[in-house]
Amino acid sequence: MTDETEKIYKILQDIMKNVWEQQKYAEVKNGVLLTLNIAILAIITRISKASITINNDIYTQWIFYTLIALLIIHIVCIMQSFFPKDRNKEDIKWTNDDINIFFFGDIQKLNSSRYLKLLLEKIGADKVGISQVALLDLANQIVKLSEIAQSKYTSFKFAIYRMYGLLFMFFIYFTYLYFK
């Protein structure tokens, strides 16, 4: 490896470490959210045992079991963020945006060859003395990790919205039972 190639390789390794840390952070956030939702499910089912035996109305029970089913579906959707995405094939991507070469949200918009080309342009490297074969493989790894991290962050964001909606529906349900 030439000195220029080695310099760029180290830059790519640093970027990959940063993206890997973001991916691990997203994984931890989703794990905490999953644990919280399972705890909520346990608490709600425990509280509801008393309210269902007191209230024998078939419609109330149907609404409760529908809400529990929605909560279980929500938990399964959170668990999908933990399934590995090990496909190495890149999709054809196109963007005219101004790309930050260090941010995983921008990196995942590119394919590895476009990302490597953009990186070389932004750091002002001389493309003549660079062996791009190993650099393309590392750029591919960075792009795929960026896609995974972006997917996990998106999954977390939507899970939070679903959780708020479900908790609001349970709040309405238990308020209705209380004032009935």
Image (tube, rainbow, N blue to C red):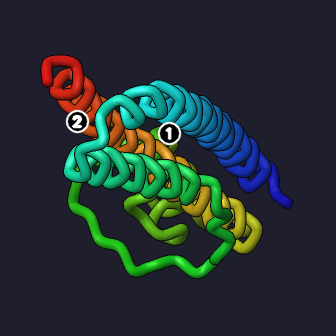
Pick the front one: 158 or 143:
158
**What residue is at 47 percent from the left and 69 percent from the top?**
111
Q: In the image, 171: left or right of 116?
A: left
Q: Position of residue 19 (x, y in %)?
A: 60, 42
Spot the residue most to the right: 1
Residue type, numbered disc 2: Met
Amino acid carrying label 1: it is Phe
Query: Which residue: 54% across, 48% down?
Result: 149
**Residue 161 image point, x, y percent:** 28, 38
Say if 147 sits above or below 101 in the image. below
Location of residue 91 (image quadrant): bottom left
Q: Nearer the viewer, residue 129 or 155?
A: 155
Q: Whole-Å distance between the Cαs marked 2 and 1?
A: 40 Å
Nearer-the-camera pick, 154 or 3: 154
Q: Nearer the viewer, mark 2 or mark 1?
A: 2
Q: Which residue is mark 2?
A: 169
Q: Which residue is mark 1?
A: 102
Q: Locate the N terminus by quadrant.
A: bottom right
